[in-house]
Image (cartoon, rainbow, N blue to C red):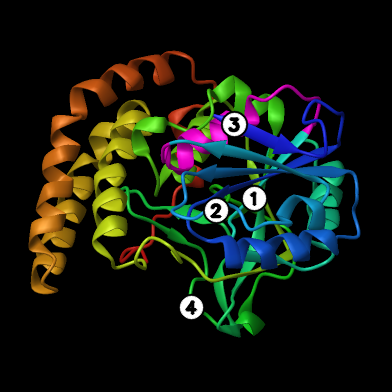
Amino acid sequence: MASNSTINSGNAFRCSVIIVNWNSWDMLSRCLESLDRQIFQDFNVLVVDNASDQPAPSGLLSAHPRVTLIQNQTNLGFAAANNQAVALPGDSEWVALLNPDAFPEPDWLERLIEAAEKNPDYSMFASRQLMDANRLLLDGEGDMYHVSGLVWRKGHGKPANDAIRQPQEIFAPCAAAGLYRRDALMSAGGFDEDFFCYIEDVDLGFRLRLMGHRCLLAPGAVVCHIGSATSGGRQGDFAVYHGHRNLVWAYVKNMPGWLFWACLPLHLAMNLITVAVFIKRGKGRVILRAKRDALSGLPKMWRKRREIQKNRGASAGQIWRALDKSVFGR
């Protein structure tokens, strides 16, 4: 790993913004320009490049002097790259995760930090995400977790005019634009690197909830988001494989106590239905490979489950109240 920067990553900032980059230099430049316009200024930026095909554009660091660039020699995945940046020496109280295809409004960080100051009982904060291609539509307002183990972004595809107006507790942040208390992230062990990418943010949010942490939507913290810009889209083979493999692992690791067994029939049914749907869409090979690999990884995930459940501070009843229980889910 090599690093190049005009700012010492050990300096004390109130917040560190972490961006994991892979073959998205053009979008990253736009993202960094949006960060340059932030009203809140007490932050640094850590960009972790996961072995992009092309090197960083010349002048990137001189154009954005608050940026530290960490250049990996291999693609570690979204989960491991974020862990790598969070673990760097530093005294930042807060960690903001931002995708290179997410472009924050000038008051984005200010609104997140303001929400954190006003709500000290919360350790995670979600942003309002608008679709970059059509800002009249929501990309999401944090992540939802259904009793079946299905996950989705709250409000995805709905008119932005119908968005939540006041801060509201939700299950977990979408890591495309979320804020976390750094000590909470560290105590949870960060992202599960076996996930590589997709659903890793929901898994982290679930583990933090099991530890007693909570998540609040800060509706005034707005970003415009493209989404899956470098991974072939949400219905591409890469996203389908990792997302539907990791759905199983997240459920097995995290669903606590009696809820695991009570909701297991729904989880099995949800998996069978999604397999049938993707076979009908011509994605049979990739969805079956995802579920095969999910099953082969169950012994390892069960070992992780034992450790997670042994250390949880939230009751099964508290988790039940945080789950989405609508009949048809999304």
99 to 214, vertically: above or below: below
Task: Looking at the image, tell me whether mark 4 or mark 3 is earlier in sequence order.
Answer: 3
Describe the element under mark 3 as helix, strand or loop: strand
Instruction: Identify the residue at horizontal 54%, vertical 21% (top origin).
Output: 313
At x 49%, y 20%, the residue is 312
3D distance between C-alphas at marks 1 and 4: 19 Å
Counting from the top left corner in percent of width and height, residue 14 is at 86, 37
Looking at the rendered structure, the kind of residue marked 1 is Gly
Q: What residue does disc 1 label?
A: 178
Residue, disc 3: 2
- Which residues lie in the magenta part? 74-93
Mark seen at residue 157? 4
Which numbered disc flags the more N-terminal residue, 1 or 4? 4
- Residue type, numbered disc 2: Cys
* Labels 1, 3: front one: 3
Residue 72 image offset from top left, x and y in percent: 51, 36
